[in-house]
Amino acid sequence: MEGEGSRRSAAGRLVRFIARHDGVDIPVEVERHGNEYRVTLGDRSIVADLAAAGQFIRSLRLQDGTQLALLHHRDGTTYEISLTDAAIHVDITDPLSLKRGRREDEMDAGGVVKALMPGRIVRVLVNKGDSVTKGAGLLVLEAMKMENEIQAPTDGIVDRLFVTPGQTVEGGAELVHIAAEPQS
């Protein structure tokens, strides 16, 4: 997700991503306003409050008073959202992850892993000196009431950890440095 520093307001940071549903890409913007979120889907905006009611159950309250219970399950970038009478499958693409993917292709020998969005470090899954493979979980970052596992972009050795559990970070903050494994 992409934090837009130039459009930051007193209410919160704007986050952008792309949702793909039935083959259609929908631009999504989310901005926090107190305990609520202003969500813009294409050219429509809604204000909503989303609260956890269990590990996968969420309570969604819209500005007009409508309240919905939904089940949420994530498998990679695909999210399944089940309402009372429907199940929606959405693929979420983070514009920064596309940029990051290009950087990862250039980063075969290791490098710094940065936060793609502001949030709070929930768990650090690795220790300094650990050997990691591409795709291995490094840490869990909570943002917008969702936990996001940050994965290793390349094989290597964790030689520096810049964060600890409970720490708040801004988008772009350095999280972990992965050094290339010595050649035998």
Image (tube, grey):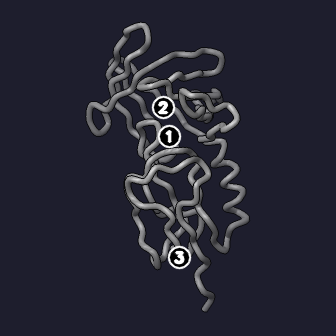
Q: Nearer the viewer, residue 91 or 4?
A: 4
Image position, residue 147 (x, y; %): 41, 45
Work out which residue is located at the far front of the displayed protein and give it.
10
Secondary structure of residue under mark 1: strand
- Of the numbered discs 2 and 3, the one sitting upstream in the chain is 2
Residue type marked 3: Asp
Of residues 112 and 92, the one drawn nearer to the viewer in this rendering: 112
Question: Mark 2 or 1 closer to N-term?
Answer: 1
Which one is earlier in the sequence, the residue at label 3 or at label 1? 1
**Nearer to us: label 2 or label 3:** 3
Q: Residue at x 48, y 31 (%)?
A: 89
Callout 2 secondary element: strand
User: Which class describes the residues within 10 Å of circle 1: few (<14), some (14-19), or many (20+)?
Assistant: some
Q: Which mark is residue 78?
A: 1
Pick the residue in front: 75 or 143.
Answer: 143
Q: Residue at x 67, y 55 (%)?
A: 101
Residue 167 position within the rendered picture, expressed as x and y whole percent measured from the top left: 43, 53
Image-based side of 58 in relation to 158, left or right = left
Verify CB contact (< 8 Å) between mark 2 and mark 1.
yes
Q: How far apart are the two marked residues, 2 and 1, measured between alpha carbons?
A: 7 Å
Quadrant of the snapshot with the N terminus: top right
Q: Nearer the viewer, residue 73 or 12?
A: 12
Above or below residue 113? Residue 25 is above
- Closer to the eye: label 3 or 1: 3
The x and y percentages for residue 131 are: 48, 76
Crowding at dot 2, Cα within 10 Å, few <14 / some 14-19 / many 20+, comes out as: some
Query: Does residue 127 sit above or below 38 in this rendering?
Result: below
Which residue was labeled with disc 3?
159
Estimate the spatial distance between the alpha carbons at disc 3 and disc 1, rounded to whole Å: 32 Å
Which residue carries the number 2 mark? Answer: 89
